[in-house]
């Protein structure tokens, strides 16, 4: 069957969990726990994902083609070889860039309306 | 030695409890992600315990229980949606099969002509009793087959849209959408407005199927029978065009369109609809493997 790939625009806007996972994978493949730690670090602890949210999100993102499971396994000496590693797909990279641009646009509107100054 | 046994008791207990909690997730999800989830939870437990001891572990459990409850509901609902989607496609497939049958029932009012033709051919005229029986039957169903067929085809188109809309692409979705809309409109118009309008709307319904078929021939979203939508959707619009735009073409066939002609065309449509419906409902196993993009919300 020749299924047509979904357009990244159709996957926007992303939920915070999805965006954060893609962002965590932007600089290379990671396993589930590493993703969880990086999301927590990137958001200064504001987003804490439990295993259910993490793997529920991973399941949906694998199904929609945003991420891929890596075939390579780590050296058993360095890491648990049972861990599954995930990486961004081409679609995931495009969707992440589009979402970042969308958020940047929103931020510029907020700046234009001096929302950040008002809150200070 | 199992590495788990070298952990503090509170960690071992936590992992056992979490392993038990995983049983509440749908089995498919649990099989795919239960192991990694347990592994991640173990890592979280170790971190929490090493940083804040039992207090950290209790805090982790509070977060984890909330996460567990939320995602169990999500995954179970998601499974329910998949099942409902699958059931709907299967039902709509059978609806299309039935539409093939009900379309042929529209010839019941002409059954006397068929019977007479049969008996005339074989030298034995239809008896009054047979004729009366037919009259009773045909009166009862005279007004039903066409609207019922429209309803069933519209239902079948919905199934096609859900099942093949995504893989066939946006133009195919629009074509089936036009078909569905026209089907619904023709159903309403059947009871409210003059017949030519209804016939044209039905033609649009079939045209939607036809255009989807043209795309399906190129994209091949179905495992088999990608030519069936074209064959099923071609004839009705053609007949309507010939009837209302080029009536002189039909006059070649005689003062009245012969029964054999209509019966042949309707039989082709019926067989194609029935086959298409059958293939649609049989494709349900592949539906389970496909996750809809609308399910991406986390």
Image (spheres, coloured by chain):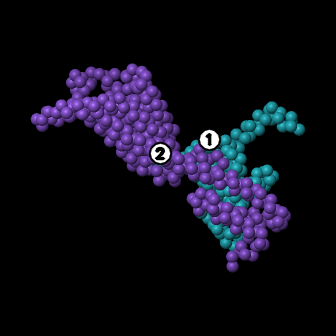
Chain colours: A cyan, B purple
Residue B238 x %, y % = 34, 29
- For label 1, the crowd category at 10 Å Cα-Cα, with few meaning under 14, some 14 to 19 and many 20 or more, is few
Residue under circle 1? A9
**Residue placed most toward the observer, B255 or A88:** B255
The answer to whether residue A106 is visible is: yes
Q: Which quarter of the picture shows residue B212?
A: top left
The nearer-to-camera label among 2 and 1 is 2
Q: Is residue B212 above or below residue B243?
A: below
User: In the figure, is residue B259 to the left or right of B278?
Assistant: left
The answer to whether residue B172 is visible is: no
For the N terminus of chain B, give its image quadrant.
bottom right
Residue extending farthest to the left is: B123
SS label for mark 2: helix
Chain containing mark 2: B
Q: Are marks 2 and 1 in contact (CB under 8 Å)?
A: no
Chain containing mark 1: A
Residue under circle 2? B89
SS label for mark 1: helix
Residue B54 x %, y % = 82, 65
Q: Residue at x 56, y 48 (%)?
A: B81
């Amino acid at each position: 069957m020749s299924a047509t790939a979904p357009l990244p625009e159709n996957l926007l806007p992303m939920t915070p969990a999805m965006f954060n996972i893609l962002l965590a994978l932007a600089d290379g493949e990671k396993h589930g726990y590493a993703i969880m730690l990086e999301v927590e670090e990137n958001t200064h602890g504001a987003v804490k994902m439990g295993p259910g949210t993490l793997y529920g999100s991973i399941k949906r993102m694998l199904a929609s083609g945003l991420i891929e499971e890596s075939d390579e396994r780590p050296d058993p000496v360095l890491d648990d070889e049972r861990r599954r590693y995930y990486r961004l797909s081409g679609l995931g990279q495009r969707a992440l860039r589009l979402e970042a641009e969308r958020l940047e646009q929103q931020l510029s509107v907020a700046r234009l309306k001096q929302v950040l100054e008002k809150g200070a | 030695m199992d590495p788990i046994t070298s952990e503090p008791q509170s960690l071992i207990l936590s992992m056992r409890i979490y392993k038990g909690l995983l049983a509440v997730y749908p089995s498919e999800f649990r099989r795919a992600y239960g192991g990694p989830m347990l592994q991640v939870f173990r890592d979280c437990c170790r971190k929490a315990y090493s940083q804040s001891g039992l207090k950290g572990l209790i805090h982790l459990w509070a977060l984890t229980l909330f996460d567990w409850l939320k995602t169990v509901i999500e995954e179970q609902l998601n499974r329910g949606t998949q099942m409902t989607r699958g059931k709907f496609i299967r039902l709509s497939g059978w609806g299309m099969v039935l539409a093939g049958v009900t379309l042929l029932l529209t010839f019941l009012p002409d059954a006397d002509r068929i019977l007479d033709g049969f008996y005339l051919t074989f030298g034995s005229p239809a008896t009054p009793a047979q004729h009366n029986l037919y009259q009773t039957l045909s009166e009862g169903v005279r007004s039903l087959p066409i609207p019922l067929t429209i309803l069933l085809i519209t239902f079948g188109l919905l199934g096609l849209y859900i099942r093949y809309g995504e893989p066939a692409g946006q133009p195919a979705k629009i074509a089936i959408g036009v078909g569905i809309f026209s089907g619904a409109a023709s159903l309403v118009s059947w009871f409210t407005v003059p017949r030519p309008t209804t016939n044209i709307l039905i033609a649009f319904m079939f045209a939607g199927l036809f255009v989807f078929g043209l795309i399906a021939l190129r994209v091949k979203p179905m495992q088999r029978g990608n030519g069936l939508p074209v064959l099923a959707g071609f004839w009705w619009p053609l007949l309507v065009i010939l009837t209302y735009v080029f009536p002189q073409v039909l006059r070649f066939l005689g003062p009245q369109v012969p029964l054999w002609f209509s019966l042949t065309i309707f039989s082709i449509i019926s067989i194609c609809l029935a086959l298409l419906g059958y293939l649609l409902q049989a494709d349900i196993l592949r539906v389970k493997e496909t996750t809809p993009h609308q399910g991406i919300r986390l």
